[in-house]
Image (cartoon, helix red, strand yellow):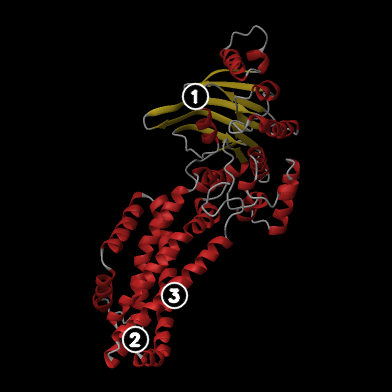
């Protein structure tokens, strides 16, 4: 990490659901091109943290600074603009069921960015090509496999030219044989320098992609550092222990 | 018997004109109900507590009071009280439109709640405003899902429209009664009226069924299940 201004700065983020504190003050910084991987046990607050970063869930307290601008969470136009800058990939894909793969991508371009249909279609074609689905543009979500759906979802997010991509367990809802195609797309994005924050249990992604790991537990960052620091030989970190357990479960 | 047929043959053009009037009432009322129903459903699902209360009160009022009472209440009561000189057609359209709107609101509300919540989230995550997400993502899907229930609502409103005869609207029932009272061929004429209502119901339901198949989302069977 460099000493430049961070692209995203999160400070003391808090969120409580029904008297149940989920985030108890989370702070971190992310620089352009950086990749943070969030790991930790279920219920630790990973999803909530991601959803608070693009304000799909409005945090109760704390600050979000994006591109040197402090986000005003009470201004709707500011939130809508912020969400355009921060793309999100969901565990369950969340494609729009009534739209073809192409229109899943073009709808936001046409409705939000007001692109003419031809330009939007052209952009969708390019994005689908990038994720290897150029020939599936006409198909509807119900006609696609899980891996294909997630790749369309990635193409949909990228078409908005986000500056950061949030990925919430992007491979967890996939059949094992379909995980590879999605991982490859994510690795290509990383190679192109996409700034990302990803929650995942996928060991291969943690070790190879992360340049910073946040281990979240009980609404806090319990541990953080580079993969070398946390997963290096002989580390006695919580992260190491957690990854060992994941390895045992998956038999990797 | 031959007299009956002759009376029906004579009266048929007159009754069919009435069915045009009935058709116009039903189509207008269904469209009013569609607009009101969509707004009410969106208010019930996404609105603040005040909106939800107001919409709830509207829905319960029109579900709880008989259409005949509503017709009298509005036509002889409210509109007269407000000095509004509405025609029978306008009055019936408003009353039936608001009535079916209350039922359609519940149809659309159920459809909205049946959509996977993640799609609205995904639309928001792309930067859509709530209004954009509702218009571009929610409505196109719930309108498709709702066609069978809407077609049921059409057949109910078509038959309720017969009540319009009490305020003097020249629709099928009023015209049938008019001819019957002069010819005394009650049995034959009301059978004819019943057949006309049946054909209008059948035709309308058939058209809506075709529409439902036409706008079906590829990859889903007609039950809406993932194949």
| Residue with the mark numbered 2 | B175
Looking at the image, residue A168 lies above or below residue B201: above
Residue visible at 50% across and 47% down? Answer: A76
- What whole-number distance in Å separates the C-alpha atoms at marks 3 and 2? 16 Å
In the image, A160 versus B190, the foreground residue is: B190
Q: Residues within 10 Å of mark 1 (few under 14, many from 20)?
A: many
Residue B152 visible in rendering = yes
Q: Local crowd at mark 3 within 10 Å, few (<14), some, or many (≥20)?
A: some
Residue in front for this viewpoint, B130 or A101: A101
- Up-down: is B95 above or below A193? below
User: Which residue shows up at 27% across the image and 70% down it?
Assistant: B70
Q: Quadrant of the N terminus of chain B?
A: bottom left
To which residue does mark 1 refer? A44
- Host chain of mark 3: B
Q: Is residue B174 visible?
A: no
Q: Position of residue A167 (x, y in %)?
A: 61, 33
Q: Is residue B82 left or right of residue A72?
A: left
Seen from this angle, which residue lies furthest top? A234
- Chain of the residue on which disc 2 is drawn: B
Circle 3 sits on which residue?
Answer: B200
Q: Nearer the viewer, residue B145 or A221?
A: B145
Please report, as a chain letter, where disc 1 is located.
Answer: A
Q: Is residue A247 above or below residue A29?
A: above
Task: Work out whether mark 3 precedes mark 2 in sequence or the reverse, and give the earlier one.
Answer: 2
Viewer-side label of 3, 1: 3
Q: Which element is circle 3 on? A: helix
């Amino acid at each position: 990490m460099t000493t430049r201004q961070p692209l995203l700065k999160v400070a003391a983020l808090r969120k409580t659901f029904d008297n149940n504190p989920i985030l108890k003050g989370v702070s971190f910084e992310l620089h352009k091109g950086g990749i943070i991987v969030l790991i930790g046990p279920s219920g630790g607050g990973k999803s909530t943290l991601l959803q608070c970063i693009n304000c799909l869930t409005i945090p109760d307290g704390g600050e979000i600074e994006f591109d040197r601008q402090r986000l005003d969470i009470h201004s709707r136009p500011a939130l809508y603009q912020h969400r355009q800058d921060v793309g999100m990939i969901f565990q369950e894909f969340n494609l729009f069921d009534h739209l073809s793969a192409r229109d899943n991508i073009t709808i936001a371009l046409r409705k939000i960015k007001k692109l003419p249909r031809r330009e939007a279609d052209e952009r969708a074609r390019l994005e689908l090509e990038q994720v290897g689905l150029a020939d599936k543009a006409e198909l509807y979500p119900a006609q696609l496999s899980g891996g294909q759906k997630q790749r369309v979802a990635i193409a949909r997010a990228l078409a908005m030219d986000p500056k950061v991509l949030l990925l919430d367990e992007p491979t967890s809802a996939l059949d094992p044989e379909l995980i590879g195609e999605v991982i490859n797309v994510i690795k290509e994005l990383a190679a192109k320098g996409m700034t990302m924050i990803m929650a995942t249990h996928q060991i291969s992604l943690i070790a190879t992609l992360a340049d910073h790991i946040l281990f979240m537990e009980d609404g806090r960052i319990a541990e953080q550092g580079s993969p070398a620091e946390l997963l290096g030989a002989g580390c006695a970190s919580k992260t190491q222990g957690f990854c060992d357990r994941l390895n045992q479960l998956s038999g990797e | 018997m031959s007299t009956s047929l002759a009376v029906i043959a004579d009266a048929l053009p007159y009754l069919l004109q009435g069915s045009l009037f009935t058709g116009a009432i039903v189509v207008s009322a269904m469209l009013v109900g569609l607009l009101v129903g969509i707004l009410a459903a969106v208010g019930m699902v996404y609105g603040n507590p005040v909106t939800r209360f107001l919409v709830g009160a509207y829905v319960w009022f029109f579900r709880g009071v008989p259409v005949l009472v509503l017709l009298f209440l509005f036509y002889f009561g409210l509109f007269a009280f407000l000095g509004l000189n509405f025609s029978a057609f306008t009055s019936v359209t408003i009353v039936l439109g608001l009535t079916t709107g209350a039922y359609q609101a519940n149809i659309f509300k159920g459809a909205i709640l049946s959509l996977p919540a993640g799609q609205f989230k995904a639309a928001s995550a792309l930067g859509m405003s709530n209004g954009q997400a509702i218009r571009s993502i929610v409505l196109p899907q719930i309108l498709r899902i709702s066609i069978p229930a809407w077609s049921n609502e059409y057949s109910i409103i078509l038959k309720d429209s017969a009540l319009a005869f009490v305020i003097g609207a020249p629709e099928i029932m009023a015209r049938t009664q008019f001819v019957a009272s002069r010819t005394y061929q009650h049995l034959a004429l009301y059978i004819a009226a019943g057949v006309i209502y049946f054909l209008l119901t059948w035709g309308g339901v058939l058209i809506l069924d075709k529409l439902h198949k036409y706008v079906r989302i590829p990859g889903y069977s007609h039950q809406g299940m993932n194949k």
